[in-house]
Image: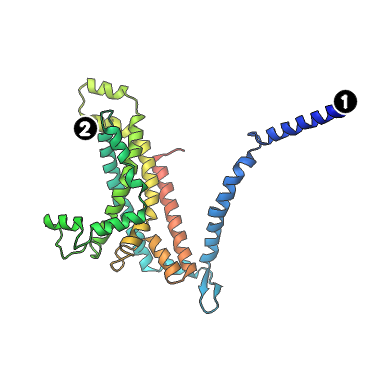
Amino acid sequence: MQSDVTTLNTVKKTSANRRRTFLSDRAFIWIFPVTSVLLVFAVYPFFYNIYLSLHEFSPMKRSLVWVGTENWVKAFEDARMWSALSINLSYTFICLSIQVALGMGIALLLDSEGKGYGLMRGLMTLPLVVPPAVTGMMFMLLEDPQWGIFSWVLSLLHILSPETPILATPDTALAGVMIADIWQWTPFMVLIFIAGLRSLPKEPFESAMLDGASSWLIFRHLTLPMMGRVIAVAVLIRGIDLFRVFDYVYVMTSGGPGTATYTLSFYSWQQTFGFVKWGYGATLSLIAMVMLLVLANLFIKLTKLKW
């Protein structure tokens, strides 16, 4: 009898210990999987990149050779790196400005409970599920000088002649790549802005309408200030993604014509895998990361975003 009681108490203690193991006071068990993923796919590659930036691959020795800060000095003296950074900043600023403006305009138009608006909001998500490489291929065909619809329309409007290929002309190649990015990611901004508009209180708008305020005054003095935090978050997310653009450039122009569409990410990839300069490619990627961190934190400070 006593042995049965002892066994029962042991089972109860074991069950209690198991339950306590999975309670919130044992947080390590829950964060261990996420921590492991971060260590393997974020922390380790970051420090390995730093290690690579201080070395360079030697084809003769078929191994990494210590070069110290040579790659860093070379990067800051590399005119092509500065050109790629300039293209990166131009690409990010122009695409971001257009996507924010279009996104806000379309969001205001779709912010309605009328019949069919729900379907239209759903259709806005379709470009987001298309892989960027496929989008790049699609727009490369649309901008083809012989049978592309964009080239045909621009020639009808006398903006570009049929003999001027969009993606093969230095003055228009970057704009051709931007069109693909704007088409695919403007719906992302629309969805964020619609969510923000739906969360705004109705009372200030009703009062403004009763006072006879015009739509423009309501938008300028109520909608924009109240949407400021939502816009800032959307700009931050898209800005980070735009700064590291690679897919569209690789598929549509491969950095050409010449270096007209060389971005920092593409230049880093080319040096790493095209010219087998692993150390220099790692250095360029670290410079891009540092630039992105500086710009993102500066933006957060200027907009006073709080997480």
Q: Which label sits on residue 1?
A: 1
Q: Is residue 47 left or right of residue 95?
A: right
Residue 271 x, y percent position in the rendering: 42, 68
In this view, which residue lies farthest toward the right? 2
**In the depicted structure, whether residue 270 falls above or below residue 182:** below
Three-letter amino acid code at the position of disc 2: Trp
**In the depicted structure, whether residue 304 falls above or below residue 134:** above
The residue to which callout 2 is attached is: 216
Residue 294 x, y percent position in the rendering: 43, 51
Residue 285 x, y percent position in the rendering: 45, 60
The reply to whether residue 86 is in sight is no
Label 1 sits on a secondary structure element that is: loop
Q: Residues within 10 Å of mark 1 (few under 14, many from 20)?
A: few
Q: Is residue 55 left or right of residue 113?
A: right
Q: Earlier in the sequence, mark 1 or mark 2?
A: 1
Label 2 sits on a secondary structure element that is: helix
Identity of the residue drawn at 45% across and 56% down = 289
The reply to whether residue 47 is in sight is yes
- Name the colour scheme: rainbow
Q: Viewer-proximal residue, 297 or 103?
A: 103
Q: CA distance from mark 1 to mark 2?
A: 85 Å
Q: Which label sits on residue 220?
A: none
**In the depicted structure, whether residue 36 falls above or below residue 221:** below
Q: Name the image quarter holding the N terminus.
A: top right
Numbered circles on residues, count: 2
Three-letter amino acid code at the position of disc 1: Met
In this view, which residue lies farthest toward the bottom? 60
Instruction: Between label 1 and label 2, give the one nearer the viewer.
Output: 1
Identity of the residue drawn at 26% across and 39% down = 106
